[in-house]
Image: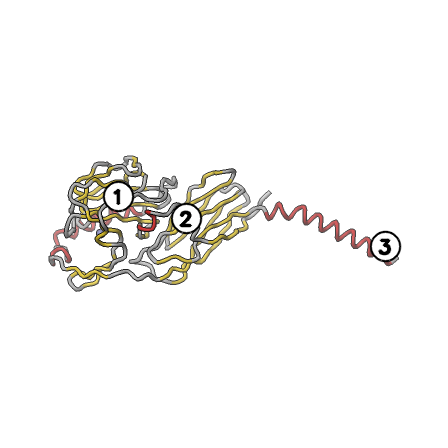
Amino acid sequence: MKPLNDRRKTLFCLGAALIVLFLFPAVAAAYVNLQYPSSAGVGKPFAIRLTSPEVLEEVSVEWQGRTVPLEISQWNGKYIALGLFGSSVAKTKPGIHTMNLRLKTPGGTTERSVSIRLRSIKYKEDHLTLPEKMVTPPAEVLAKIALDRKATSKALATQTLSRKWGLPLQRPVNGIVTSPYGRRRILNGKPRNPHGGIDYRAAVGTPVAAALPGRVLLTGDHYYAGKSVYVDSGGGVISHYFHLNSISVKEGDPIATGQKIGESGMTGRATGPHLHFGLSLSGQMVDPEPLYSLTIAELLDQGVFLRIETKGGE
Ligand SMILES: [Zn+2]
């Protein structure tokens, strides 16, 4: 009696194990691989990539208070979403920051948060003396400044899904860097916001090349930035070129990397002829410098992998 009972139990257990083994791999197959940095310097750009063997319908990323949808492409039978992010030295404090991901698959919506530690970076200080009227704008230009800001804020809030950016970026001019990203300016003894872009020495009339492809979002003649061009490269990536002497593109124009967008000058608030180049990633002004030499793969290599189980599966 007893041995038979034990054999039955064993057979039952084996059967159950086989059923679980047969079902479980199909359920566990629904996952997405995330590559992201566990830490990054304040002001430095970084990349994330989501790779899924299963259908990925929508990806959105919440970072530094803004939610950005990422374009999904298919490559080698996999679904891939790439994002370029960063933090602004003017607005971000070092420490642990959270990135929230929302993934839509045929099985449902999966939400996942990851922590990214933003490390403090020591940026230099610049003491400048400018004519007082340039430091404190006269009352009659305040309305003009407010209008400029409205137009530029709207441009920087633009989100287009189609990813046109690629890496490495092309240098817009060949001149030396006269003021790097992050340098804090003390104007006439008063501390100002840290420098949000890179200044290159460039004689008036030097051709300015597009650092990355996209579409012209805004051109203007602003009080501080002078003649300026904003280019949207999709996925929240927007670049801008300030103090131009002339602009050779118009709003809506498609832009190829290296294409001439204008000539450098010293329009707006500039102490001498130079080009100011800025890069905004989902509203965060970051340091473009690392992106002149790194490919997307090299930038991603700075990160770690995380397997995210998604809902459902077949
Ligand atoms: Zn500048």
Gap in Å between the C-alphas at discs 2 and 1? Answer: 22 Å
Gap in Å between the C-alphas at discs 2 and 3? Answer: 63 Å
- Numbered circle sitting on residue 172: 1
At x 39%, y 53%, the residue is 63
- Numbered circle sitting on residue 13: none
Q: Is residue 276 left or right of residue 281?
A: left
Q: Is residue 182 left or right of residue 295?
A: left
Answer few, some or many: residues within 10 Å of disc 3's Cα (few below 14, many 20 plus, some between 14 and 19).
few
Residue 244: x and y in percent read: 19, 43
Decide if ligand 1 comes within 8 Å of the CB at mark 3.
no
- Foreground: 71 or 48? 48
Decide if ligand 1 comes within 8 Å of the CB at mark 2.
no
- Numbered circle sitting on residue 4: 3
Dot 3 or dot 1: first in sequence order is 3
- SS at circle 2: helix
Residue 58: x and y in percent read: 46, 43
- Foreground: 282 or 124? 124
Examine the rendering and report whether any part of residue 71 can be seen: yes
Q: Is residue 268 left or right of residue 109?
A: left
Decide if ligand 1 comes within 8 Å of the CB at mark 1.
no
Residue 27: x and y in percent read: 61, 47
- Residue type (three-letter) at the residue carrying disc 3: Leu
Dot 2 or dot 3: first in sequence order is 3
* Residue for badge 2: 298
At x 42%, y 42%, the residue is 71
- Looking at the rendered image, the quarter that the N terminus falls into is bottom right
- Residue type (three-letter) at the residue carrying disc 1: Pro
Residue 50: x and y in percent read: 47, 47
